[in-house]
Image: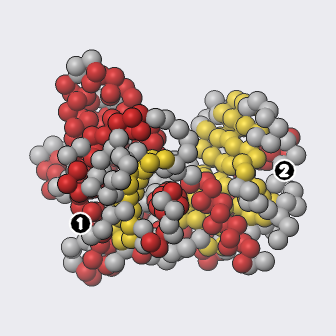
Amino acid sequence: MTATRVLVLNSGSSSVKYQLLDMRDSRRLAVGLVERIGEENSRLKHTPLTTGGASRERTGPIADHEAALKAVAEELAADGLGLDSAELAAIGHRVVHGGQSFTEPTVIDDTVLAEIERLIPVAPLHNPANLTGIRTARALRPDLPQVAVFDTAFHTTMPESAARYAIDVETADAHRIRRYGFHGTSHAYVSRATAELLGKGPSEVNVIVLHLGNGASASAVEGGRCVDTSMGLTPLEGLVMGTRSGDMDPAVIFHLMRVGGMSTDEIDTLLNKKSGLIGLCGDNDMREIRRRIDEGDERAKLAFDIYIHRLKKYIGAYYAVLGRVDAVAFTAGVGENAAPVREAALAGLAGLGLAVDGDLNAVRGDEPRLISPAGARVAVAVVPTDEELEIAAQTYTLVGKNI
């Protein structure tokens, strides 16, 4: 195919992140962000990468996603990269929830849109915004293939024993209650990149992937296929996160309703936005938490210890699920940059072949690298994630098959 560019769009409720890539060499041509859509102080930051030009910003009201994408198109056109270019092969959209219906990237048509809309009850914060971005992009370029790449797709290989909750089957099926998992494009990219770092194919390697950002998730990847992951019906389950509680006794919710007099919406806000690290110590920035620990702040130390305790439990659990582990890979903002988190998470696990080399762990860099001691039974790696590249690659591969 002659067209080799893919525009990746990640549409949030009031933002649009975008990247334009040339898939001949996976090179980024431009990146940008539109934020505070619908407000008077909307902001667009656009960075062209083809000429080394400086970033450009525009501020002022951007009424809706249609206006946001038109502004993006104008910025791209100013760099000779417009949406009307014959070199644009497709637009790839991040869609958070694909349920059981979508197990791989999918060319978007009206039927696909209807199914994504049907899944809104299990992703009320994400799928509506994703749909808005898709509909706007289709209106701007109705002739261009548009592809949905789903956060949940990588996890659809989980066996039923991992995906099912132990509740009444008929009730679960009626309301589509099961464990779906999220951050799938990151887990797919990082597990594959880890195998490459070890000089092996994905099918040869068992990897525990730890995606640690403000949102955090773990996955057990066996021979390139996810067999378990920490997030569930929603991104609330699993690890302690920046503002989310992760695992807890469901009866806490009943207690808060009956004894605390809290409404469903109040509890939802508590668990998703006022819990995790910010609920424990008032900060959800790991750098600030470490600074406070260094100054002797006991509340920050307890938050860090709870975060690490949960993380270590999942590492041990997924070691048991996989039976054989070839590598543990840390990724995302905290995983890639917080050496103390990596060290603490694996402390005391030498009996499982897990350890970090202090000097290697202290090194910072943008490339995948090993931080385990030479000759370690299990490799420990830091692998910068690249969800946009993963979305672009899946989009380009699919579009190539359909042309």
Helix, strand or loop under label 1: helix
Whole-percent x, y for residue 251 in the image:
15, 56
Q: Write down the quadrant of residue 49 in the picture.
A: top right
User: Residue 320: which numbered mark, if any?
Assistant: 1
Task: Please report the residue visible at 63 percent of the width from the left and 29 percent of the height from the top.
Answer: 41
Q: Position of residue 335 (x, y in %)?
A: 41, 44
For label 2, the residue is: 82
Residue 282 vertical placement versus 152 (above, below): above
Mark toward the viewer: 2 or 1? 1
Instruction: Report whether 242 appears left or right of 111.
Output: left
Left or right of 214 on screen, residue 45: right
Q: Position of residue 200 (x, y in %)?
A: 50, 66
| Residue at mark 2 to residue at mark 1: CA–CA distance | 50 Å
Residue 144, above or below 73: below
How many numbered discs? 2
Q: Position of residue 167 (x, y in %)?
A: 21, 74
Amino acid at circle 2: Gly
Label 2: element kind: loop
Compared to residue 291, the image places residue 76 above or below, namely below
